[in-house]
Image: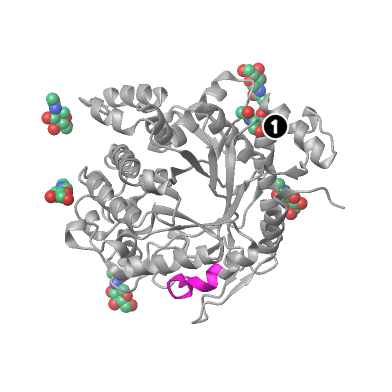
């Protein structure tokens, strides 16, 4: 019903009519008033007393052989020295907000508050936040974007429950230092990625053995998020009055055959093992029922005396339940899912699913399927399942190193994907409040090194000053931001 109401509104605004049978067509119209447009990057530069992170360590080990091009992120796009230039790029684009992450080790070098704070790290973020605000760009901060202080990794990292209180300490320092000016917080970026990544556990410790590690990591991440949320609620929200969420990555899992109920169930399992794994406990106090059932049964079949999926005791259940003001969604691509016997990869194996791609789908430069409508499916799934405001915190197109200024595929990608967000609002009644393009500029793309370019600004990594230049996609996004969507062409 909500869909129909919005539908009528659009009709009024742009004077175009659509019927349900034409939902696949491009939808002209604007986003709701107050919708926020922004761009994102993450941190990771070494300077002024920053401690070593697990990521710094991993990218240097074995002469960089862990990274596609053997390079590390020490300098990357050098935002550390260029932050004001980046603020102007955002201003030129007319962005409402800038999503960036803090480096824990820059603020607390060993990760432990008892070892002391690095004032230069706080100062750096103060400059950036003040520069943004002076230019009317809202800072949108991610507390943790994968770079764990080495001091904590050496003590088991996310597998050691004591990290929960270290994260709580870190969050308090951050709210205290920046919360007077920062009103949008994300605790974690894509825990599904770092809890499943070998670099999260240290180099000689691949994640597959033993297979309970990602579940323990997740358990501690969920507790850490909840502690930060409670600290914010009790000590800071009354005076600072901000919003807090978590960013979960979820590509869409389209059932291979929608007429087959088994394929529909495979879709449901897939999304619950990816998105529900985190959203369910943080909103409802427990893991999705289907995860509980399957992982418990498999653990028993493996002869274990307890499930690989831990449980929250009553104290923790109370602490974690209802600790989100909004849900973040990072989305890039889509695949088909179908039931399987659970033998391919432990995560999909636990969920009994197999994925496939459709050969007819376009591929991005780095081989990810370009399927714009999948963004509408996942947005609407999250909206219906959790009835929460949704912030799209990442979406973007990865190209090869050769990607230059004329990035037509990226322009097409943004237009088509953003249009599907509009459809999820207009046709499905999803409460989407923000859209974030990844990324403001080409950057160091984790294990892909500099071999993948996601930026809407081109960065010359061979030039000492790392000059940036807007690509076509930056111009296209600026127009969409200015128009708050897609007015009918004149
Ligand atoms: C790293 O490279 C240096 C110089 O090429 C070489 O001497 C050293 O053995 C390499 N180390 C490893 C771990 O591959
Ligand atoms: C867990 O962390 C605590 C303190 O941070 C440390 O004393 C302990 O040794 C760690 N446990 C493991 C297994 O590393
Ligand atoms: C899809 O599933 C339905 C119901 O099981 C089945 O009748 C149909 O043959 C399937 N289609 C394909 C292409 O396999
Ligand atoms: C359960 O299994 C673990 C690991 O194999 C073992 O250390 C523990 O003693 C067992 N507990 C019980 C109650 O059997
Ligand atoms: C797929 O690629 C073709 C050729 O570049 C392009 O015309 C089309 O718009 C693309 N489709 C999507 C969904 O991006
Ligand atoms: C996903 O979206 C497509 C395009 O809108 C639609 O045809 C399909 O039915 C959706 N899938 C599911 C499972 O709802």
Front residue (pair 128, 455):
128
- 274 in relation to 489, above or below: above
* Ligand 3 sits in quadrant: top right
In percent of width and height, residue 206 lies at 30, 49
Neighbor class of circle 1 (other Cα within 10 Å; few <14, some 14-19, many 20+) is many
The stretch of residues the image draws in magenta is: 77-87
- Residue 310 shows up from this direction: no
Q: Quadrant of residue 126?
A: bottom left
- 238 in relation to 94, above or below: above
Q: Indicate whether residue 78 is drawn in magenta.
A: yes
Residue under pointer 1: 427
In the displayed structure image, the side of residue 438 where residue 193 appears, left or right: left
In percent of width and height, residue 153 lies at 24, 54
Colouring chosen for the image of the structure? one colour
Q: Quadrant of residue 59?
A: bottom left
Say which quadrant the N terminus sits in: top right
Mark 1 secondary-structure assignment:
loop
């Amino acid at each position: 019903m909500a869909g129909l109401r919005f539908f009528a509104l659009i009709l009024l605004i742009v004077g175009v009519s659509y019927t349900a049978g034409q939902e696949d067509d491009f939808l002209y119209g604007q986003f709701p008033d107050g919708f926020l447009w922004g761009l994102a990057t993450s941190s990771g530069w070494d300077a002024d007393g920053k401690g070593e992170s697990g990521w710094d360590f991993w990218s240097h080990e074995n002469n960089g052989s862990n990274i596609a091009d053997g390079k590390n992120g020490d300098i990357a796009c050098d935002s550390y020295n260029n932050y004001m230039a980046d603020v102007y790029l955002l201003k030129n684009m007319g962005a409402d907000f800038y999503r960036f992450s803090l480096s824990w080790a820059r603020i607390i070098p060993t990760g432990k508050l008892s070892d002391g704070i690095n004032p230069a790290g706080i100062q750096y973020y103060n400059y950036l936040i003040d520069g943004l605000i002076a230019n009317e760009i809202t800072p949108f901060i991610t507390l943790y974007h994968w770079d764990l202080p080495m001091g904590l990794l050496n003590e088991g990292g996310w597998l050691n429950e004591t990290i929960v209180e270290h994260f709580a300490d870190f969050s308090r320092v951050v709210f205290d230092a920046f919360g007077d000016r920062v009103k949008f917080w994300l605790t974690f970026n894509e825990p599904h990625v770092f809890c499943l990544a070998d670099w999260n556990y240290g180099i000689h410790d691949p994640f597959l053995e033993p297979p309970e590690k990602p579940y323990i990591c997740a358990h501690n991440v969920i507790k850490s998020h909840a502690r930060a949320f409670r600290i914010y609620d009790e000590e800071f929200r009354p005076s600072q009055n901000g919003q807090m969420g978590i960013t979960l990555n979820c590509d869409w899992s389209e059932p291979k055959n929608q007429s087959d109920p088994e394929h529909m169930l495979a879709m449901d399992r897939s999304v619950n093992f990816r998105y529900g794994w985190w959203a369910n406990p943080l909103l409802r106090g427990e893991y999705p029922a289907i995860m509980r059932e399957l992982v418990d049964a498999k653990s028993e079949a493996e002869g274990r005396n307890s499930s690989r999926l831990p449980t929250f005791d009553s104290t923790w259940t109370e602490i974690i339940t209802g600790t989100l003001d909004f849900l973040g969604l990072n989305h890039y691509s889509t695949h088909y899912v179908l039931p399987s016997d659970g033998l391919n990869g432990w995560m999909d194996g636990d969920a009994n699913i197999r994925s496939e791609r459709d050969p007819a789908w376009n591929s991005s430069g780095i081989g990810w399927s370009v399927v714009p409508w999948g963004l509408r499916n996942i947005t609407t799934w999250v909206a219906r399942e959790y009835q929460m405001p949704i912030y799209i915190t990442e979406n973007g197109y990865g190209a090869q190193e050769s990607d230059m200024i004329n990035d037509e595929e990226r322009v097409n990608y943004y237009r088509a994907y953003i249009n599907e967000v509009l459809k999820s609002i207009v046709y499905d009644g999803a409460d989407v409040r923000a859209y974030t393009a990844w990324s403001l500029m080409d950057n160091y793309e984790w294990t892909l090194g500099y071999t993948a370019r996601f930026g809407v600004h081109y960065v010359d990594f061979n030039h000492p000053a790392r000059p940036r230049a807007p690509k076509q996609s930056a111009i296209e996004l600026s127009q969409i931001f200015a128009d708050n969507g897609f007015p009918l062409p004149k």
